[in-house]
Amino acid sequence: MKGAYEHRLCAEVSLNHRFSLLGTIVVMMGVATGCGANDATFEDDDVAEAELAQVDLGLEWRSYTVTYDNNATFGTILATGPNVSGAFRPNREYWYVNASNLQYLGTEDLHFSHTDGTGTPPSYSGTQEFNLPRIASWTSLGTDTSSGNRYTSGNLDLRIFTSSGAISQVIWYQTFTPGSVGPSNVTPNGTFTTNSGAVTPGTGQVTYKVDQTP
């Protein structure tokens, strides 16, 4: 969900797009082969960093409903666009979490669905509420952690950390084969299954992440 500026991965690929994590438009950054010595290994300080939106939104806002496989409620994530109305700040992710159900993280799959809207977004509430920038920097993954609660859906991974009964950290990952489309807005949809261990790209693949703390 983060930012907008021209980023050149190599002489063959450059873009000038506005990107966001959970956002209104899908954003993409090119990844190409033959980009030189830095292709071989990526560390966190290799700024394959374009400021993109983490979670995609549809019109002026997008509301994500998240439930566990046992039908318990995880919460709602409201992604706002630049022209959102009401008391909401533009380009933010508002998280409304049912903290009493965080006990199910890591054991129950997560299910995402969303609704798009214009005008003033609906009001939500949660026993834990926080907001994050919707526009964030996707950086290439070095060595990943194996802690936290990991979920996987296709080439997307989500890792949620908790502390003292509340969410303390959120990491989104995207894995690609060089030469294909690179990091884009995340539009979580459908089932994210429980997983474990570090996110490790396969041979010839590259992983990008956005790491945020409430």
Image (cartoon, grey):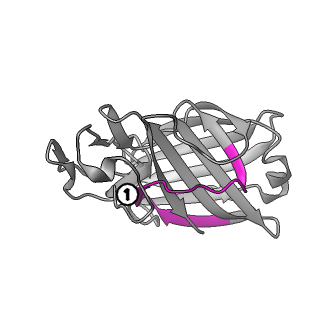
Q: Tell me residue 203's x, y (percent).
A: 48, 34
Snapshot quadrant of residue 42: bottom left
Nearer-the-camera pick, 37 or 91: 37
Amino acid, disc 1: Lys
Q: Tell me residue 122's x, y (percent).
A: 55, 51
Q: Residue at x 29, y 32 (%)?
A: 179
Snapshot quadrant of residue 128: bottom right
Q: Viewed as shown, does residue 130 lie left or right of 31?
A: right
Quadrant of the snapshot with the C terminus? bottom right
Q: Residue at x 26, y 57 (%)?
A: 4
Q: Residue at x 32, y 59 (%)?
A: 3
Residue position for label 1: 2
Segment colored magenta? 129-150
Snapshot quadrant of residue 200: top right
Q: Residue at x 60, y 45 (%)?
A: 199
Name, please, the residue furthest toward the left.
Answer: 11
